[in-house]
Image: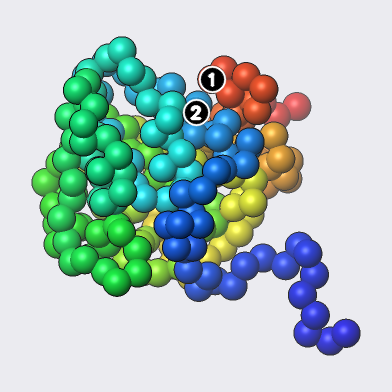
């Protein structure tokens, strides 16, 4: 039938994030594998940025518990979740409160982020393709760009369902990503295309997600 949507049809370019009641529910195994590997990168006395996407929220249950480090976030939910951890110094980026969503993604937030520097910026988006990371809103793209610009290491959390997808607003180009973490379901063609842009890719193992494996082309 004309106009019918096939199962492989990509999302609309302005598909907005799900409400947090859905976004922060139990993640799929491949998403947990990515979140867990990402959390394993945090070292003693690191300062890291963790945003409010579901896969970033998923990192919380895997955060190191035996070393001191600092988290900066623009998410009220994440800030509330970590505020009482004695080994974590936590900072909440300010900005305008929104009726929908609990993350700060306005001009105030952008300016505040620019005043920091991060050892690792954990970033993501609605799509990761040859044009870079993209998202549904220009504001979300601008926030990711601001975080990447002040991060010594920009780590992109990229579940396979986001790979090869292009959304409305591009945040950063591929060359701004230092490490891309995906899962075993990522399309080989997309992985090879991204690797051709000299992006390091780590494939998180769902069975042993703290280990992961470098992807190497034949």
Residue 48 visible in the shown view: yes
Quarter of the picture holding the C terminus = top right
- Residue 194 higher or lower than 94, as above or below: above
Categorize mark 1 by other alpha carbons within 10 Å: few (<14), some (14-19), many (20+).
Answer: some
User: Is 35 placed left or right of 137 in the picture?
Assistant: right
Q: Are circles 2 and 1 on residues that touch, CB within 8 Å? A: yes
Say which element carries label 2: helix
User: In the rendering, which numbered label is found on residue 210?
Assistant: 1
Q: Position of residue 61 (x, y in %)?
A: 43, 30
Quarter of the picture holding the N terminus = bottom right
- Residue 154 higher or lower than 94, as above or below: above
Q: Of 125 and 72, which appears nearest the observer?
A: 72
Q: Of 57 and 161, which appears nearest the observer?
A: 57
User: Is 104 placed left or right of 140 in the picture?
Assistant: left
Residue positioned 67% across, 65% down in the render? 10
List the single residue furthest toward the top: 66
Labels in figure, total: 2
Q: Position of residue 141 (x, y in %)?
A: 37, 61
**Quarter occupied by residue 208:** top right
Say which element carries label 1: loop
Categorize mark 2 by other alpha carbons within 10 Å: few (<14), some (14-19), many (20+).
Answer: many
User: In the rendering, which numbered label is found on residue 36?
Assistant: 2
Residue positioned 38% across, 26% down in the render? 63
Q: Position of residue 34 (x, y in %)?
A: 54, 34
Q: Of 117 and 63, which appears nearest the observer?
A: 63
User: Is 158 placed left or right of 62 in the picture?
Assistant: right
List the single residue furthest toward the right: 1
């Amino acid at each position: 039938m004309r106009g019918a949507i096939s199962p492989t049809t990509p999302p609309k370019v302005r598909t907005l994030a799900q409400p947090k009641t859905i976004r922060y529910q139990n993640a799929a195994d491949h998403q947990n594998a990515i979140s867990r590997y990402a959390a394993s990168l945090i070292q003693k006395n690191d300062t890291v940025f963790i945003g409010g996407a579901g896969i970033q929220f998923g990192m919380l249950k895997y955060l190191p518990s035996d070393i001191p480090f600092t988290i900066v976030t623009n998410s009220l939910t994440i800030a509330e979740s970590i505020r009482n951890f004695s080994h974590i110094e936590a900072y909440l980026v300010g900005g305008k409160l929104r009726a929908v969503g609990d993350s700060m993604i306005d001009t105030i937030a952008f300016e505040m982020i620019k005043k920091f520097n991060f050892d690792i910026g954990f970033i993501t988006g609605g799509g990761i393709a040859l044009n870079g990371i993209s998202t549904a809103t220009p504001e979300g793209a601008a926030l990711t760009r601001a975080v990447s610009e002040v991060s010594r290491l920009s780590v992109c959390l990229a579940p396979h369902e986001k790979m090869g997808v292009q959304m409305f607003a591009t945040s950063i180009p591929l060359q701004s990503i230092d490490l891309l973490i995906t899962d075993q379901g990522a399309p080989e063609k997309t992985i090879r295309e991204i690797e051709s842009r000299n992006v390091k890719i780590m494939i998180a193992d769902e069975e042993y997600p703290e280990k992961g494996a470098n992807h190497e082309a034949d």
